[in-house]
Amino acid sequence: MPVYGKLTLGVVWGFLQGTLLVVTAWLHEDRSARLRDPLEQSLTSCLPRVERPVTPPVNEPWR
């Protein structure tokens, strides 16, 4: 069934489905990076902040 010229309903549906997949994945990633589990917050709220150690450069030989 042509929608416009040679653009068929299947092409439009596939494009919308792919767009929905990308937008949903982006929103999920954004939300999961911002929010933390309340249990995790309660466990780490009373602990002092710890500086992470500096990681060695990638090209440093293994010991």
Image (tube, rainbow, N blue to C red):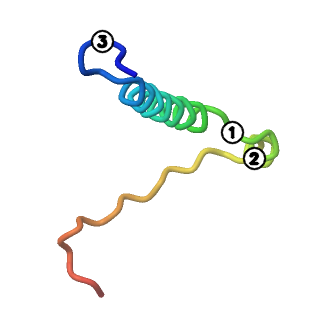
The amino acid at mark 2 is Glu
Quadrant location of the C terminus in the rendered image? bottom left
> Residue visible at 77% across and 43% down?
46
| Residue 21 position in % (x across, y down) | 49, 35
Dot 3: what SS?
Answer: strand
Q: Nearer the viewer, residue 34 or 21?
A: 21
From this view, report whether residue 24 is shown above or below residue 50: above
Instruction: Report the residue marked by disc 1.
Output: 36
The amino acid at mark 3 is Tyr
> Residue visible at 57% across and 50% down?
50
Q: Is 30 left, or right, of 14 in this rendering? A: right
Q: Quarter-wise, where is residue 19 in the image? A: top left
Farthest residue in the bottom direction? 63
Dot 1: what SS?
Answer: loop
The amino acid at mark 1 is Arg
Instruction: Report the residue marked by disc 3.
Output: 4
Q: Nearer the viewer, residue 55 or 12?
A: 12
Instruction: Report the residue marked by disc 2.
Output: 40
Circles 2 and 1: CB atoms closer than 8 Å: yes
Q: CA distance from mark 2 to mark 1?
A: 7 Å
Q: Quarter-wise, where is residue 9 in the image? A: top left
Q: Nearer the viewer, residue 25 or 48?
A: 25
Q: Nearer the viewer, residue 6 or 16?
A: 6
| Residue 36 position in % (x across, y down) | 69, 39
